[in-house]
Amino acid sequence: VRVEDKLFYNRYLVDVGRPHIKVRAHTKPSAQLLALLRACPARCYELNDKGQVEITVDGCIECGTCRVIGEPTGDIEWSYPRGGYGVLFKFG
Ligand code: SF4
């Protein structure tokens, strides 16, 4: 079973306008930001048409991978969603 197929079973409550992860503004992405494109299991990080890394937190499973990679260098700000928001694991 692919990870993407398993992630389908999760449900996510979006905290509109209050993303719990933010990418620091940049013109050219750092090596850490580029690594996040591949490291996030939920594929939350994407390149926009200017070649900058953006995040869409919908679907984030709060695994903390991007926190380990991007927070020490200040590339991202990471916090847990507010109570009641974020991922709801149906299985496991
Ligand atoms: Fe992706 Fe995990 Fe970071 Fe959420 S916490 S954006 S799932 S790497």
Image (cartoon, rainbow, N blue to C red):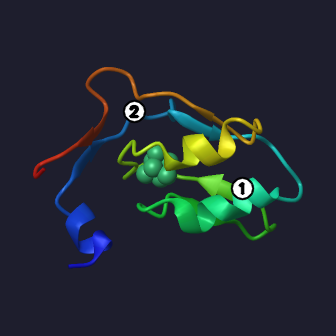
Give neighbour class at mark 1: few <14, some 14-19, many 20+ (Cα, 10 Å).
many
Indicate the secondary structure of the residue bearing disc 2. Answer: loop
Q: Which mark is residue 33?
A: 1
**Position of residue 36 measured from the top left corner of the image (x, y, whole percent):** 62, 59
Indicate the secondary structure of the residue bearing disc 1. Answer: helix
The amino acid beneath tag 1 is Leu
Disc tally is: 2
Give residue 33's quadrant in the image. Answer: bottom right
Q: Closer to the camera, 81 or 13?
A: 81
Which residue, as the protein is rendered here, is positioned at the far left?
A: 91
Query: Left of 41 or right of it: where is 77?
Result: right
**Position of residue 11 measured from the top left corner of the image (x, y, whole percent):** 21, 49
Give neighbour class at mark 2: few <14, some 14-19, many 20+ (Cα, 10 Å).
some
The numbered mark, 1 or 2, whose residue comes first in the sequence reads: 2
Above or below, 58 relative to 16: below
Q: Quadrant of the N terminus?
A: bottom left
Which residue, as the protein is rendered here, is positioned at the far top?
A: 83
Residue 57 seen by the camera: no
Q: Residue at x 70, y 66 (%)?
A: 48
Query: Left of 74 or right of it: where is 84?
Result: left
Residue 27 seen by the camera: yes
Residue position for label 2: 15
Q: Are marks 1 and 2 in contact (CB under 8 Å)?
A: no
Q: Residue at x 26, y 62 (%)?
A: 7
